[in-house]
């Protein structure tokens, strides 16, 4: 079918087939490559968004005209379609070629050398790629990721609307609030000394929509957090499927997600098998004890075993007085070099050492700390259920340290042993019953563990008991949940605290009184005093979701214009200095400047 855009082209570069042979067509695209066979014969590859087409130059004039152009110039070619003598079955257009009668240059590439080869741009240095992102995006592999992102977002919107949710946008300029990360602040020209904040999430607004009488809300929401980058998190800006439901609880939210996600993952994912409803529900404490992580990869069949009593007194120094966690791996075929590499990776990731020993094919203890285990060999074999050719990975330390280290060890061992990991599937689970509070690593004081707007399990009564010293605040759980897929946390959500009395009591435990709550959350506090419905919601990360579906390791591969790890846009030159006049207008004085 001919392309509707006939001003510059009648067909796309991915469209022509044998049925077009003999037709006169016009194509437009980027000059990807020219291969000169002789002065009067050359093969040109023309590429556009849809694919590539071979153009055959059969005159000296045509060859010279193409040789005069730099690669990646945009060109319009009019010519006749004919069958290729040497066909390329790997290309959709591999049966045909175009013999040009007219060539027009639409946009000159004025650079003799490109910063990287377009089709191999992903091998280039990341800073070079991000500086020339408009070229990087010409790479069909990267373009495919962006198309996938568009299709997934469209599918999410369709499904949410079919489930009765309204797509409502919420403000980008709002007030700063303590939601766990640093705000991006925007100075106000009309109100000197005051600042807007870019929303870390639409949290308060979506709860206010529930208080306003809307029943089901969602949006593909931009969120802004001034935090460091990592593989599955982009600094600065990210997007989430934000949703909220009135007169709803945890099970209502789960039912929607369990209906929406599996079909999308099965259709668009690298793997075509996804968990079906109901997803497994794992309490937080059980997840940490069994998998050493609150985002376990359930494709791996390995679990943690507590070996504290068994090995704590074996005479190995790091085990004494500590919790010891074991990961037992049957049918292990790794070499000593591979084991050392695996343990080194665990130490780099956790800062803690991993230990090990093996029961070889002859039933003998070998390697690692086996000499400390040898005196209690039979006891260890019985307690851990060891069979010949079994590897035992170990971690030690305080409870949480031992759990987390063993959790990373479990993940590494699962990825190393194909028979212990059903890789080609999307395995979802819910992590539930999170702690409401924790001791902050930096402050050393009681803080909210996740979302401060979550409903505590036990409601007002348990908070009052904690305030009176009758209950340890660290034992209070929240009606809060995480959605996890293949070891990646896709989302956090919760049943919300819709009662201002409970809200005030919850904040008092972290040292904020009623006046503080009113000052920091005036709209939500006041709205709830008018009678708010019980409500619950969740906000799966779109970027992480697409990263999983595309099978990418870095989130920057599925974002059109990402920042680098230092939160810089190298292409646009952001952040940048502004003029003194702009600063004066905003009543801002700069006290320090980064060196240019």
Image (cartoon, rainbow, N blue to C red):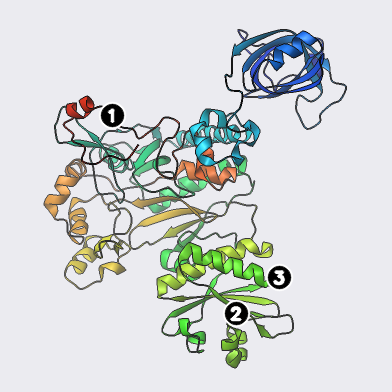
Badge 1 crowding class, 10 Å Cα cut-off, few under 14, some 14 to 19, many 20 or more, is few
- Label annotation for residue 578: 1
- Count of residue discs: 3
Q: Examine the rendered structure and indicate whether residue 426 appears above or below residue 269.
A: below
Residue 147 is drawn in which quadrant?
A: top right
Task: Evaluate if marks 2 and 3 touch, with contact meaning CB atoms under 8 Å apart.
Answer: no
Mark 2 — residue? 368
Residue 349 x %, y %: 49, 62
- Residue at 41% across, 70% down: 400
Gap in Å between the C-alphas at discs 1 and 2? 59 Å
The residue lying toward the viewer, choosing from 527 and 523, is 523
Q: Secondary structure at mark 1?
A: loop
Mark 3 — residue? 333
Looking at the image, residue 569 sits to the left or right of residue 463; the answer is right
Q: Secondary structure at mark 2?
A: loop
Nearer to us: label 1 or label 2: 1
Which residue is at the far right? 85
Gap in Å between the C-alphas at discs 3 and 1? 60 Å
């Amino acid at each position: 079918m001919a392309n509707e855009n006939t001003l510059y082209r009648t067909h796309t570069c991915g469209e022509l087939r044998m049925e077009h042979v003999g037709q006169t067509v016009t194509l437009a695209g980027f000059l990807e490559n020219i291969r000169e066979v002789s002065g009067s014969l050359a093969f040109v590859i023309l590429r556009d968004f849809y694919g590539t087409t071979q153009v055959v130059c059969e005159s000296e004039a045509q060859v010279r005209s193409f040789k005069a152009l730099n690669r990646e110039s945009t060109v319009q070619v009019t010519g006749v379609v004919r069958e290729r003598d040497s066909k390329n079955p790997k290309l959709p257009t591999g049966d045909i070629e175009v013999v040009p009668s007219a060539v027009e240059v639409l946009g000159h590439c004025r650079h003799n050398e490109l910063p990287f080869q377009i089709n191999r741009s992903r091998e280039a240095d990341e800073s070079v790629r991000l500086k020339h992102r408009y070229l990087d995006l010409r790479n069909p592999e990267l373009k495919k990721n962006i198309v996938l992102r568009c299709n997934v977002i469209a599918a999410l919107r369709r499904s949410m609307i079919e489930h009765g949710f309204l797509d409502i946008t919420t403000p980008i300029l709002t007030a700063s609030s303590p939601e766990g990360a640093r705000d991006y602040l925007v100075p106000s020209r009309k109100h000197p000394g005051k600042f807007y904040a870019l929303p870390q999430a639409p949290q308060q607004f979506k709860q206010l929509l529930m208080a306003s009488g809307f029943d089901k809300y969602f949006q593909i929401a931009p969120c802004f957090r001034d935090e460091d980058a990592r593989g599955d998190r982009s600094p600065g800006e990210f997007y989430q499927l934000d949703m909220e439901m009135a007169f709803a609880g945890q099970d209502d939210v789960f039912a929607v997600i369990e209906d929406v996600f599996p079909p999308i993952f099965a259709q668009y994912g690298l793997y075509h098998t996804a968990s079906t409803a109901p997803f497994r529900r794992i309490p937080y404490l059980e997840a940490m004890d069994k998998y050493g992580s609150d985002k376990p990869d359930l494709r791996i069949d390995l679990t943690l075993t507590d070996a504290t009593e068994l090995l704590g007194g074996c005479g190995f120094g790091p085990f004494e007085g500590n919790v010891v966690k074991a990961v037992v791996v049957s049918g292990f075929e790794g070499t000593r070099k591979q084991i050392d590499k695996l343990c080194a990776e665990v130490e780099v990731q956790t800062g803690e050492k991993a230990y090990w020993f093996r029961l070889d094919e002859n039933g003998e203890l070998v390697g690692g700390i086996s000499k400390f285990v040898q005196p209690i060999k039979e006891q260890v074999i019985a307690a851990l259920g060891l069979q010949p050719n079994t590897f035992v990975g170990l971690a030690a330390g305080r409870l949480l340290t031992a759990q987390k280290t063993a959790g990373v060890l479990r993940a590494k061992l699962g990825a190393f042993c194909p028979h212990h990991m059903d890789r080609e599937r999307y395995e979802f689970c819910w992590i539930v019953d999170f702690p409401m509070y924790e001791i902050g690593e930096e402050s050393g004081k009681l803080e909210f563990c996740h979302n401060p707007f979550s409903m505590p399990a036990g409601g007002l009564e348990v908070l009052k008991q904690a305030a009176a010293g009758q209950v340890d605040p660290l034992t209070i759980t929240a009606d809060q949940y995480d959605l996890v897929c293949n070891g990646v946390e896709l989302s956090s959500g919760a049943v919300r605290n819709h009662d201002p009395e409970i809200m005030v009591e919850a904040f008092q435990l972290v040292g904020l009184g009623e006046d503080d709550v009113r000052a920091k959350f005036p709209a939500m506090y006041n709205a709830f005093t008018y009678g708010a419905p019980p409500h619950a919601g969740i906000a799966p990360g779109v970027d992480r979701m697409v990263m999983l579906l595309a099978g990418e390791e870095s989130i920057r591969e599925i974002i059109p214009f990402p920042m680098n790890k230092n939160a810089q846009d190298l292409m646009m030159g952001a952040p940048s200095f502004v003029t003194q006049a702009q600063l004066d207008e905003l009543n801002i004085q700069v006290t320090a400047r980064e060196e240019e």
